[in-house]
């Protein structure tokens, strides 16, 4: 049975990581690749954040950190949640972790048993489906209405729930479509979850990167005091991709259980990185607006340029760091088009089918890069279309 599971996992290997490895291999061979497949902010981490890390190392502020994270950082997160959501959490609800993905895995370990079901968005982050399958859970795909801008089909959502369904995983702003949940959608989803005793795991990595509307957290409903688990990374809001700094917010009881599982699975985030997080959050009002403005400019240039290409139709993302253009007009499959762009234009994108069956007529393009990369990528696209 174990060998069969491994064979299935290998058969459904991580195609996104395969593409990442190929990009790095091509770059190592001297080929110039415009990497629009993965978010890698094209502007530096703010100087004050880098300086705080250097100062922490120079002054020896690298003690053994409590598993739950530095008290000072967790207090800053309480203040940050108070400013960005509609409630103030208690300190005991906060855990510091290396990534959102690791906390999704630990949350599933806490909530589910083998054979239980989780509901994921289609299209959606493929890593979450792989984590569930690794744990022996069944994945059910929550459908989106493409004609309405990839809005969740709420009428069909409750029909999907069975006695074995335990978790609904949401991302808002959404990866890969850039959709943002409205207040009405959050209310209805929360009501459905409450009626059916489901957990909501809410990935809010891009919650500050909003171009239209405003961010509404599912945790606003129960203040993360019951069955909502809020997860966030500082990677893109603060240009700290690669630093490995995230946090979870859950009920005191669930946080205690998550902490116990973390103790045997995850390394503690190094102190100097946690001090950088304190600096970032304390100065969010001066740091974040400029970063969001850069994303907005890159997004606008990308969407405008894509819609001028034959065969491409791209909706304006409401938030996040990705565009998800429909490429069916090119008469190529998403995988063939991604290969064509990499081989003929040196442009890396991700095929939409990686994110689920509903993504098959799309490609995902990240605009978390420099404006120069966006412009160069569009110029190369214009030359071959």
Image (cartoon, helix red, strand yellow):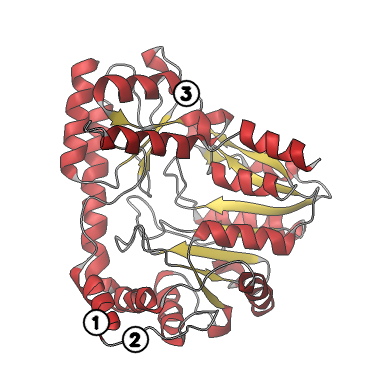
Q: Residue furthest right?
A: 163
Residue 299 image label:
none
Toward which corner of the image does residue 266 lie, by quadrant? bottom right
Sequence-wise, which precedes: disc 1 or disc 2? 1
- Which comes before the other along the chain, label 1 or label 3? 1
Disc 1 + disc 2, Cβ < 8 Å? yes
Counting labels gives 3
In whole angstroms, how far apart are the C-alphas of marks 3 and 2?
50 Å
Give the secondary structure at mark 1: helix
Using the image, determine if residue 37 lies above or below residue 48. above
Dot 2: element: loop
Q: Residue at x 75, y 39 (%)?
A: 3
Q: Are marks 1 and 3 in contact (CB under 8 Å)?
A: no
Q: Quadrant of residue 58?
A: bottom left
Alpha-carbon span between mark 1 and mark 2: 8 Å
Residue of label 3:
361
Q: Which one is in front, 130 or 160?
A: 130
Classify the position of the N terminus by image quarter. Answer: top right
Q: Furthest-front residue in view?
A: 29
Residue 15, position in %: x, y?
Answer: 50, 34
Judging depth in this view, the residue of 21 and 115 nearest the camera is 21
Q: Residues within 10 Å of mark 1 (few under 14, many from 20)?
A: some
Q: Work out whether residue 308 can be spotted.
A: no
Q: Is residue 37 above or below residue 235?
A: above
At x 47% / y 37%, what residue is drawn? 16
Q: Position of residue 239 (x, y in %)?
A: 29, 60
Quadrant for the C terminus in the image: top left
- Identify the disc placed on residue 61: 2
Question: Of tags 3 and 2, which is closer to the observer?
Answer: 2
Q: Secondary structure at mark 3?
A: loop
- Give me the disc on residue 55: 1
Which percent across, then down, holds residue 33?
Answer: 25, 33
């Amino acid at each position: 049975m174990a060998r069969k599971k491994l064979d299935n996992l290998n058969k459904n290997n991580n195609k996104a990581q395969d593409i990442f490895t190929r990009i790095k291999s091509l770059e190592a061979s001297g080929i110039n690749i415009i990497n629009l497949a993965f978010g890698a902010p094209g502007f530096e981490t703010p100087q004050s954040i880098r300086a705080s890390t250097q100062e922490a190392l120079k002054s020896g502020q690298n003690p053994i950190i409590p598993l739950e994270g530095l008290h000072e950082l967790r207090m800053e997160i309480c203040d940050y949640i108070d400013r960005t959501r509609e409630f103030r959490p208690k300190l005991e609800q906060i855990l510091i972790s290396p990534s959102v993905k690791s906390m999704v895995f630990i949350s599933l370990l806490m909530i589910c048993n083998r054979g239980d079901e989780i509901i994921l968005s289609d299209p959606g982050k493929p890593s979450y489906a792989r984590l569930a399958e690794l744990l022996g859970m069944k994945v059910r795909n929550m459908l989106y209405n493409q004609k309405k801008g990839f809005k969740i089909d709420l009428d069909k959502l409750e029909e999907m729930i069975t006695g074995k369904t335990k978790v609904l995983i949401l991302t808002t702003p959404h990866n890969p479509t850039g959709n943002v949940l409205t207040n009405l959608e959050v209310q209805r989803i929360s009501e459905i979850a409450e009626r059916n005793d489901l957990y909501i795991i809410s990935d809010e990595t891009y919650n500050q990167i909003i171009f239209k509307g405003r961010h509404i957290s599912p945790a606003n409903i129960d203040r993360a005091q019951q069955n909502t688990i809020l997860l966030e990374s500082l990677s893109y809001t603060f240009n700290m991709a690669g630093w490995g700094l995230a946090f979870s917010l859950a009920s005191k009881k669930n946080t205690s259980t998550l902490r116990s599982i973390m103790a045997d699975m995850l390394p503690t985030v190094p102190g100097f990185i946690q001090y950088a997080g304190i600096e970032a959050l304390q100065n969010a009002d001066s740091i974040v607006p400029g970063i969001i403005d850069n994303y907005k400019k890159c997004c606008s240039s990308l969407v405008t340029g894509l819609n001028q290409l034959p065969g491409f139709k791209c909706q304006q993302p409401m938030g996040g760091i990705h565009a998800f253009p429909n490429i069916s007009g090119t008469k190529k499959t998403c995988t063939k088009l991604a290969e064509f762009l990499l081989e003929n234009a040196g442009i890396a994108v991700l095929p939409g089918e990686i994110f689920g069956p509903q993504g098959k007529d799309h490609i995902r393009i990240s605009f978390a890069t420099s404006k120069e990369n966006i412009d160069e990528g569009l110029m190369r696209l214009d030359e071959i279309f």
